[in-house]
Every structure is written in C-alpha cells, then in structure tokens.
Image (cartoon, rainbow, N blue to C red):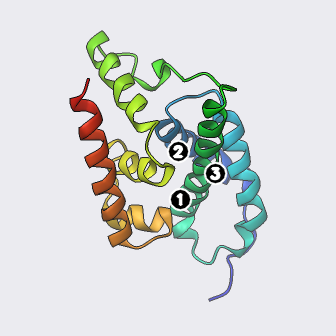
Amino acid sequence: MAPVGPVDFDRVFREHAAYVAAIGLKIMGRDDDLDDLVQEVFIEAHRGLRRLRDPGALKSWLARITVRRTIRKLRRTRVLMLFGLEAPSDYAEIADTSATPDERAQMALAYRSLERLPAAERVVWVLRHVEGESLDDIAQICACSKSTVQRRLRLAQKTLAQRMSHV
C-alpha cells in the first residue's frame, strides 16, 4: 500500500492537538512541559506524516508518538528530581475543576505514587485506568505486545497497591 497523498497539516494539528495534550497531561500529571510536548509531537508527525499508509490510523499514530515523547520527558524529569534539579509537582492541575477537595487529594496521592513507577508501567496504567483504553489499543499505542501491556499493568497495580496501603 502506498503512503497517503498530500496532507493538510494545519487541519491535522487543529483536529488532534487537544487529544495529544490530553494524553500528555494525563500521563505526566503536570502541564509545565505540555506545550513543548505537543510541539515536539507535531514536529515529529510533520516529518513522517506523508509516510503514513492508513489515514484512519492517524489518531493512534499520534498517540504512539505522544507516548514515546512523554516517556522521554518522564525519564528526564525523574533524573532531574533525583539530583534535586527539579521540584516534585503537587499535581493540582490534573484534577478536574469540579472535583471535591478530597478527590483532588486522592488524585495528587495517586500521581505521586505513579511518579515512582518506571515510565512504561506508568503509561500503561494511565492509558488503561485514566483514559479507559483497551489492552489491544494500549499495545498498539505503546508499540508492544498485549502480553507486555498486561505484565506492565500487573506490575504497576501491584506497586501502586503497596504504596497506597502505606499511606
């Protein structure tokens, strides 16, 4: 199958920028790098968009780029925090404005726990439990097998359950 024809990149950006930002925000749990993330995703997408073979796969392809870029940012942030070069987030911006104070506190606790997970496990957990993605879709987005998704999800859930029980 040949690559798709000419693509209106401005339209692609307008239609999918909010989706990319939403995934990035939910995975990272903070919005301080969100604009940079969206920009990086669409720069990479612009370079490869003409090679996309199936226009129907555009959204999942953008999600895959977003996940890859977000994992890089999570790993970088983790290293910076390890050396005291970046402060931990309070995760206030991740909760919906209609959330109660208790719900906001629970959300912050969950994201502080997610912060300690390896990036790949964090991504799978968020895509499953926050975004509500199916295991098959997560496997496609993360470019791994369904069994790898299931393994990462089990590890993340076990780790989170242990950490949440000690609070």
Asked where in the image residue 95 lies, by quadrant, the reply is top left
Give coordinates of residue 116: x percent, y percent: 45, 38
Locate residue 146: give its quadrant: bottom left
**Residue 87 relative to residue 19: left or right:** right
Query: Which residue is located at x 27 percent, y 47 percent?
Result: 157
Residue depicted at x 64% and y 49%: 72
Q: Residue at x 34, y 30 (%)?
A: 110
Q: Secondary structure at mark 3?
A: helix
Alpha carbons under labels 1 and 2: distance apart: 9 Å
Image height of 71 relative to 96, above or below: below
Residue marked by disc 2: 19
- Picture layout, residue 133 above or below residue 96: below
Residue pointed to by mark 1: 59
From the image, which quarter does the N terminus lie in? bottom right
Q: Residues within 10 Å of mark 3 (few under 14, many from 20)?
A: some
Mark 1 or mark 3: whose residue is earlier in sequence: 1
Q: Position of residue 5 (x, y in %)?
A: 72, 75
Q: Residues within 10 Å of mark 1 (few under 14, many from 20)?
A: some
Label located before the other in sequence (1 or 2):
2
